[in-house]
Image (cartoon, grey):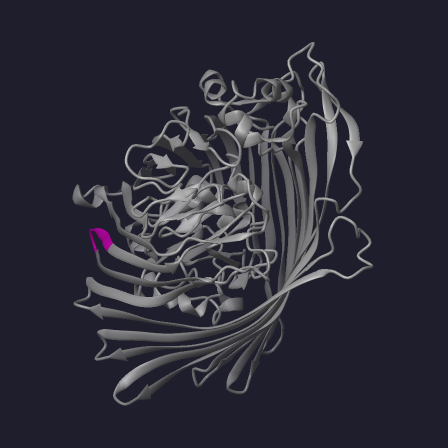
Amino acid sequence: MLLTSAAVALATAPAFADAAVEADASASTDTIVIVGLKGDAREVAGSAAVITTEELQVQDYSDINRVLRAIPGINIQEEDGYGLRPNIGLRGAGLDRSANVLIMEDGILAAPAPYAAPAAYYTPFMGRMAGVEVIKGAAGVRYGPRTQGGSINLFSTPVPDSFSGRVAVTVGEESARRIHAWAGGMTEAAPGVRFGGLLEVFTDAADGFKTIDFSSRTTGFDLADYGGKLRLEIDGPGVTHSFEARYQTSDETSDETYMGLTNADFAANPYRRYAASANDQINVDQSRYTVTWNADFDSGLRVTALAYRTEVDRNWFKVEGVNAGGGRRSLGAVLTNPSGFAAEYAVLTGAPGFVSNDDAIIARNNRRSYYSEGLQGEIAGDAAWLGAQHRWRIGVRAHRDQEDRFQEEIFFRIDNSVLVQTGQQAPGQQANRISTAEALAVFVQNDITINDRLTLTPGLRFERIEGERLDYGASDPTRSGTASVRTSTVEVFIPGVGVRYDVNDAVTLFGGVHRGFAPASPGSTSDAETAINWEAGVRWTGAAGYAEAVGFYNDYENLLGTCTASTGGGCAIGDQFDGGEVRVRGLELSAGSDLAAFANLDGVAIPVRAAYTLTDAEFQTAFQSAFGPWGNVQSGDELPYLAQHQWFASVGLETGRFGSELALTWVGERRTVAGQGAIPAGTELESFAVADLALWYDLTDALRARVQVRNLTDEVYAASRSPAGLRPGAPRAVLFGLSANF
């Protein structure tokens, strides 16, 4: 666990970090967030972690998967090698498209349609973030609607107290090129009145590490993210008001595919792509608007109210299937059994001189648009009641979001390794539907501290969710007729209570229990996902370092599975499946220290960290499911894509102007289909270990040069088998950077 206070106590910050801009990182969301960048995770009555700006700058990752590896209890399935489409789960919750984890930015829901379609294709870019907050315990009932595994809150760059800025440029192998620049600050416009703002630019691009057969097309990405904030602070009688308006927009183009490789082809060249995937590309455009008001009263009362709207348009044009004359086959079926589907495999590989039949390659415009909007407010205060100190909070959110699918297929033949279009459907033939959700959420929570050592944190969340799905079908592309309608209404109370007991200044015991909940999609016939989640832990923090151990037990009453293209298809996209009772239990260990302190080395720091996660997740009932990752489930079957063991460790050396860190991640073997015992061939992912190295030198107090080596040992490993075939993790790449603070 990366405890904020422990990290601060351990770090002997180099000159460059000392010159870093000080900013009130949670000023605009003080009431909304749980810990914040300047908070102390030890004060939470449960499991919590914070990764600060200084910690992010050590490795300078733009890949959220690599950032989160340092926190135990997080399960990750890599996909593209760059972290652009993360699959994240917490404590055994489903990983696919991070749909079962609540991802936020500055306390605001980040998914394009978090109620109607949580498994969407946009996550805020990690490379522009100032920090991360992860909440896994009962304190997370403040956030919803998904309280199953926990929540991840990303912090955007705050408006600094005075004018300052930062420019960081990175270039390297794979034609990598990244720029992150921001500048802004506050100034006194009149007595008691401060005004200011922030402008920010983040661009990132690479040509990719895969090679398409017989093609010069790249396999990388190109993205740009621009944002601005305006901030006004007014000191009034007994209260300080702050107003902040933010606009942020981004666009991304990735030459990415769902098509992986056969076992034999992966063994021969894991970074190969078949000729049929040459045109695959995803385009995503996103915009966010927020307006926030905060009032901080001298009495201790704090009020936050905000309005937000997010708009996302995306289209992933990619191969969906193949028809070599014997009927349509899925990519997964062909790549799992290339000898049994030799004609289809020949179409996908498209060797020189080969000419397929017309319409052999079936691609699809997976065109979707989303919006998410709402009003959110919280009020918090401190009081002394009945011999105890109370820090209470009340929050409310009125929310509405929508997903609009309008998709069709386009057909090609492969002709001497080149794709030639041979046909096209009318728009709307493959999906022509709108899913909408409206939600009202209310929560209350109270930190009750008794005798300065015992803190109880009871909380209760209420969610009312109304969903509607309008399906116009393939015959009504203009949507002028009557749609097929499915509706659903869910009302749920989500209670939780956490406890923290400070044995002394160094040792704290904590635990809690809360209801895990994830709603079904609008109009779904499946039940909601529900569980009772328990945790208990102990943490120690002292001058020599920190250590923490947490045990968790999640008792699912019903596990929910959602059919998406990314799970391999084989079912109607959007349909949901009940998995019944599931038991997830595990252990999270973490520790850190500065070895130089033990040797009394002056002017030198040797920070070390380690984290370990044990996860045991099993179905408790037997059933037959059309959901591909489950299949024919027997009681005792392990859940797919969950490693039983995971390790993270890092060691650094900092002296004078020089600094370095070597970070190592090890992930145990995983099965890709539910089962038990030995993992059958073709459904296994072997264990792997990846090391990343960062070296930096402060040329001046404000100018830093750095070298990063991703995957130092050039480990070759399979990151995933879904949705179709094996896909690799990213190989070794060397990057060079220069950053300046002013």
Q: Is residue 546 in the magenta section?
A: yes
Which residue is located at x 79 percent, y 52 percent? 476
The image position of residue 453, as x and y in percent, is 21, 74
Q: Is residue 299 left or right of residue 348?
A: left
Query: From the viewer's perspective, is residue 231 above or below residue 228?
Result: below
* Residue 591 showing in the rendered view: yes
Q: Is residue 499 left or right of residue 702?
A: left
Main secondary-structure element of the magenta-colored stretch: strand
Query: From the viewer's perspective, is residue 264 above or below residue 499?
Result: above
The image position of residue 34, as x and y in percent, is 42, 66
The image position of residue 367, as x and y in percent, is 70, 46
Query: From the viewer's perspective, is residue 359 above or below residue 157?
Result: above
- Tell me the magenta residue range: 542-549
The image position of residue 375, as x and y in percent, is 60, 72
* Along the line of sight, the residue nearer the viewer: 242 or 350: 350
Tally of numbered discs: 0
* Along the line of sight, the residue nearer the viewer: 686 or 664: 686
Which residue is located at x 75 percent, y 23 percent? 358
Q: Quadrant of residue 218?
A: top right
* Along the line of sight, the residue nearer the viewer: 454 or 528: 528
* Along the line of sight, the residue nearer the viewer: 22 or 140: 140
| Residue furthest out toward the bottom | 386
Which residue is located at x 32 percent, y 87 percent? 384
Q: Quadrant of residue 666?
A: top left
Q: Is residue 348 in the magenta section?
A: no
Query: From the viewer's perspective, is residue 354 above or below residue 128?
Result: above
* Residue 701 showing in the rendered view: no
